[in-house]
């Protein structure tokens, strides 16, 4: 069988008859961490056995964002990053369902009937060991197994993955990042924590302060990181540059409604506008803070740059 072309399907209404017949999994997959990747390996292995496409069903917004709004936990990755990570893990298709009042009101059995059976015609389903769904919270491994026997599909669950004695989870990764424990976050993710985005035009404030920055919109209400960090920025052409980054709302200058990622690359003078940067975080240098004047801010930025250079010298 020829491999299925990668396909991103936004909304149940965009499913076509050719999308019926697959092996699927369901989840938020925020971070696509080691626990998620264990599920995705089971998914792709099962898809090969069945000779069918591997499909990941995700939600936008994520369910906890729908219910908690601005109070929801910070995303580890935006949708674009998640899509790229899921495809990199071997998924053939991604079905992104809009999480709204209509979807939220479905019972577990209605979700199975409408999405898994009529929509996708699943042959096999892989779910995490703690997976629950439906407005009645009745959707779990036992219900899926019972419906599968009745409707002709099979279900497997995955065991909890532990690292350093505790379960791998998006919550644990957020806690590690907030505590500046980047080696632990890397262990749980399977790679250093990164934020990716396009460089946009700002107000040239960094340039006026003698510290030009590339402004990367985070496109989220909250960030899992806040403060000033030593970073490495990776460009799409393969080149990498060390630097300093601030994640925050610029309280000294004018303040922002949402956080932004501002990246200053060390000993660098090229134009980055329009490029995608993947920013890898190594060490927290300090908290973001409001300074009494722009001159004091300028002095602190130079200290941040010196501290970052010292970090990279020691790191080798």
Image (spheres, rainbow, N blue to C red):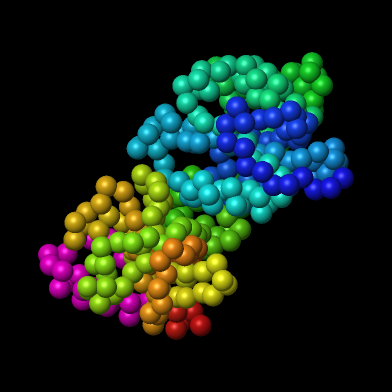
Magenta stretch: dominant secondary structure:
helix
Residue 246, x across and y down, in percent:
34, 63
255 relative position to 136: left or right: left
* Relative vertical location of residue 312 with respect to residue 86 in this rendering, above or below: below
Report the residue at 79% width, 18% height from top: 151
Image-quadrant location for residue 310: bottom left
Residue 76, x across and y down, in percent:
48, 49
Residue 53 covered by magenta stretch: no
Between 82 and 160, the one lying in front of the other is 82
Image-quadrant location for residue 188: bottom right
Q: Number of marks in the image?
A: 0
| Image quadrant in which the N terminus is located | top right
For the magenta stretch, what is the residue range?
286-309
Image-quadrant location for residue 54: top right
* Relative vertical location of residue 82 with respect to residue 309 in this rendering, above or below: above
Residue 158, x across and y down, in percent:
70, 38
């Amino acid at each position: 069988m020829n491999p299925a072309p990668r396909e991103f399907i936004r909304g149940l209404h965009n499913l076509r008859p050719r999308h019926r017949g697959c092996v699927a999994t369901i989840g938020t997959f925020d971070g696509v961490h080691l626990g998620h990747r264990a599920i995705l390996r089971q998914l792709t292995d099962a898809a090969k056995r069945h000779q069918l496409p591997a499909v990941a069903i995700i939600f936008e917004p994520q369910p906890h964002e729908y219910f908690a709004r601005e109070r929801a936990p910070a995303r580890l990755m935006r949708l674009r990053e998640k899509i790229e990570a899921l495809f990199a893990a071997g998924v053939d298709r991604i079905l992104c369902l809009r999480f709204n009042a209509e979807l939220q009101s479905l019972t577990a059995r209605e979700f199975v009937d409408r999405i898994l059976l009529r929509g996708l015609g699943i042959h096999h389903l892989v779910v995490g060991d703690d997976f629950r769904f439906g407005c009645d919270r009745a959707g779990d491994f036992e219900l899926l197994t019972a419906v599968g026997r009745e409707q002709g599909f099979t279900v497997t669950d995955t065991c909890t993955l532990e690292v350093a004695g505790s379960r791998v989870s998006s919550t644990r990764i957020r806690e590690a990042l907030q505590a500046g424990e980047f080696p632990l976050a890397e262990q749980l993710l399977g790679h250093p924590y990164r934020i990716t985005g396009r460089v946009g035009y700002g107000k040239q404030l960094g340039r006026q302060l003698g510290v030009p920055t590339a402004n990367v919109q985070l496109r989220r209400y909250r960030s899992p990181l806040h403060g000033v960090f030593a970073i490495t920025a990776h460009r799409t052409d393969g080149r990498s540059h060390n630097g300093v980054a601030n994640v925050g709302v610029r309280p000294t200058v004018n303040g922002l409604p949402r956080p932004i990622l501002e990246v200053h690359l060390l000993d660098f003078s090229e134009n980055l506008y329009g490029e995608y940067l993947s920013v890898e975080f190594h060490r927290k240098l300090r908290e973001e803070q409001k300074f009494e004047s722009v001159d004091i801010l300028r002095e602190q930025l130079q200290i941040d740059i010196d501290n970052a250079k010292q970090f990279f010298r020691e790191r080798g």
